Image (cartoon, rainbow, N blue to C red):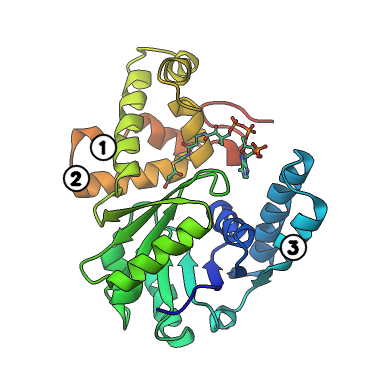
């Protein structure tokens, strides 16, 4: 297995930019790719803001920040991933788009480079199926905010080669993450359970059983979670929650994941959580 020293990240939204930061902080060279210069600039701004915050909090000095940023190249050309040992795809959750990206990667990267998807809910088996080397494809699922949360799910398919899984686990550990190896089922492990919990919380709100504030307080103070479900859904993005919930439900058909009409209405109304300034709560 080739050593992983250069990593490509495709898609520089919140998750992709966070993943770039994780690899650069871990001492790896990173090439981040976006579709347009505007999105590339937005990705760079997310990276800058996150490392600025670490400097402001005294967690990183300016020389350290310059070193991290110096390891990152931002590009709008997938061809710049030719030298990558590992590529992590973090584009929007549309299967056709994932297939397009992986088909292009087949022609760009070396045959023994590893291809990973950061998808939250789509099937890794399905993403890998049309590629020329499905054995080198795994899921590598980070949690939001990626620079902070230690868990990564390494998702394997029936075709994933053991050496590929080992290499991805090893590089995750090198980054200071805690990898868990899980099978390819809807929601994997963490989101399968988390979204069942979100659905139950949404039902309580729909039935007027509790206010959003008291619901959040109950789980934060009573269950020792860092944030309650409404605050967490606002952080993840209500559109993202709606989409992931739908995908999991379409596979499980379990009432535990049945879509919430209220969440659907909020998304349709443009209440998307922190990123739109308003979700369950309003943000400055
Ligand atoms: N990017 C980078 N760093 C961030 C950050 C971000 N977006 N948000 C917070 N941080 C850092 C802060 O800089 C701070 O770092 P230091 O301790 O080094 O100074 C640290 O995180 C703690 O931040 P704060 O003090 O501002 O706030 P906090 O203590 O309330 O923590 C939190 C914020 C880390 C988000 C915490 O509340 C938390 O862990 N919440 C739960 C998040 C969670 O469950 N995420 C999973 C979502 S599900 C998912 O992601 C899966 C999916 O597929 C949808």
Residue at mark 1: 257
The CA span between labels 1 and 3 is 44 Å
> Label 2 belongs to which residue?
252
In the image, residue 207 above or below residue 4: above
Q: Is residue 201 above or below residue 130?
A: above
Determine whether label 1 and label 3 are within 8 Å by CB: no
Residue displayed at 58% across by 70% down:
35
Q: Is residue 96 above or below residue 1?
A: above
Q: Secondary structure at mark 1?
A: helix
The quarter of the picture where the N terminus appears is: bottom left
Whether the residue under disc 1 has CB within 8 Å of ligand 1: no
Please rate how many residues cluster around mark 3, counting C-alpha atoms within 10 Å: few if below 14, some from 14 to 19, many from 20: some
Image location (x, y in percent) of residue 14: 57, 51
* Residue 205 point in image, percent of width and height: 38, 20
**Which circle's residue, 1 or 2, is located before the other in the chain?**
2
| Mark sitting earlier along the chain (1/3) | 3
Task: For ligand 1, tell me if the residue under mark 2 lies within 8 Å.
Answer: no
In front of the other: 158 or 187: 158
Asked whether residue 141 is in view, the answer is yes
- Can you say whether 231 is above or below 182 in the image? above
Residue occupying image coordinates x 40% and y 12%:
210
Q: Secondary structure at mark 3?
A: helix
User: The C terminus is located in which quarter?
Assistant: top right
Give x and y (percent) for residue 181: 31, 55
Read off the residue under disc 3: 67
Q: Dividing the picture into quarters, in which one does residue 76 lie?
A: bottom right
Cα distance in 3D space between marks 1 and 2: 8 Å
Q: Residue furthest right?
A: 62
């Amino acid at each position: 297995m080739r050593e992983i020293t250069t990593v490509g990240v495709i898609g520089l939204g919140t998750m992709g930019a966070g993943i770039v930061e994780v690899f650069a902080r871990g001492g790896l060279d990173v090439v981040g790719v976006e579709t347009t210069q505007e999105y590339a600039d937005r990705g760079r701004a997310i990276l800058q803001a996150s490392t600025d915050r670490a400097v402001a909090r005294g967690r990183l000095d300016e020389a350290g920040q310059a070193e991290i940023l110096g390891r990152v190249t931002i590009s709008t050309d997938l061809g710049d991933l030719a030298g990558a040992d590992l590529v992590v795809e973090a584009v929007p959750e549309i299967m056709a788009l994932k297939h397009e990206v992986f088909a292009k990667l087949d022609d760009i990267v070396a045959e023994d480079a590893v291809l990973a998807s950061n998808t939250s809910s789509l099937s890794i088996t399905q993403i890998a199926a049309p590629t020329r080397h499905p054995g080198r494809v795994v899921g590598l699922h980070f949690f939001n905010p990626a620079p902070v949360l230690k868990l990564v799910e390494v998702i394997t398919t029936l075709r994933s080669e053991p050496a590929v899984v080992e290499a991805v686990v090893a590089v995750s550990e090198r980054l200071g993450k805690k990898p868990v190896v899980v099978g390819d089922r809807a929601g994997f492990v963490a989101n399968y359970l988390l979204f069942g919990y979100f659905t139950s919380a949404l039902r309580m709100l729909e039935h007027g059983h509790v206010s959003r504030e008291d619901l959040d307080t109950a789980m934060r103070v009573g269950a020792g979670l860092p944030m309650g479900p409404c605050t967490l859904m606002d952080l993840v993005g209500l559109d993202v929650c709606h989409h992931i919930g739908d995908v999991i439900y379409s596979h499980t058909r379990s009432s535990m994941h049945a879509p919430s009409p209220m969440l659907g209405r909020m998304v349709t109304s443009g209440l998307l959580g922190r990123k739109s300034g308003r979700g369950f709560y309003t943000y400055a």
